[in-house]
Image: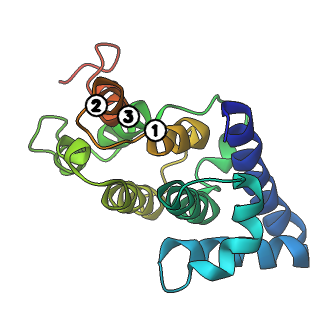
Amino acid sequence: MSGLDIREFVNHIIDQTKRKQESRDSQAVREIAALRFGMSITTEYRAYPYVLPYLGNASPRERMVALRCAAMIAEYADLGADSDDASPLRFGVWASRLARKINDDESVDGMIASRLEYLHTQDVEEAITTIRRILQYAQSNSFTQRVDFIQLFKTFWYWGNGYNDDSLDHRLEILRDFYDTSNPVN
């Protein structure tokens, strides 16, 4: 799946989510419900018709990443929907702003920071689950800034094994963005 394919795939899920919310379009409702089942190996088969056609001859790991990310996006695509004029934020920057909004300590002792600190040591499925928990927390706290799901999907698509430089670079980009100098720790 190329960068353009990832962009098209993610934008399709977000568009279907909007159609579901705005018009209760039965096809969109059915697709979003099926995509959300992609989060678990026991129910992911329901998302196959909406994910696998985009993948071509992807590896089993890539299929799993696409299914889990599609489920995550389908569930949380409405995060920040009321701020359509603002550009979506890279996940680390977005998480940093969430931490500030909820007055979470941005040091390594903060709730969000502590979850991100070891993200790069997790396998891709655990890392996606960690990010889903942060998205869920943001939604429950009415956090309205948009997250860049395309960048997040690409991060997990290229997650790798954590042993080579490219893999480490992708695994650490969320944490780097969280602590970036443009987002200073107070």
Dot in front, 2 or 3: 2
Direction from residue 140 to residue 105 in the image, left or right: left
The circle on residue 158 is 1
Q: Is residue 106 above or below residue 183?
A: below
Q: Position of residue 152 (x, y in %)?
A: 50, 41
Q: Where is residue 148 in the image (x, y as percent from the top left)?
A: 57, 37
Q: Inspect this view and state whether residue 19 appears.
A: yes
The answer to which of 80 and 180 lies nearer the viewer is 180
| Residue at image mark 2 | 168
Q: Neighbour class for label 3 at 10 Å: few (<14), some, many (≥20)?
A: many
Q: Where is residue 182 in the image (x, y as percent from the top left)?
A: 35, 14
Identify the residue shown where x is 47% and y is 57%.
Answer: 61
Identify the residue shown where x is 89% and y is 75%.
Answer: 27
Q: What residue type is labelled 1?
A: Tyr
The answer to which of 162 and 85 lies nearer the viewer is 162
Q: Where is residue 137 in the image (x, y as percent from the top left)?
A: 38, 61
The reply to whether the C-beta atoms of the residues labelled 1 and 3 are less than 8 Å apart is no
| Mark 2 vs mark 3, CA separation in Å | 16 Å
Under circle 2, the secondary element is: helix
Looking at the rendered image, the quarter that the C terminus falls into is top left
The circle on residue 92 is 3
Q: What residue type is labelled 2?
A: Leu
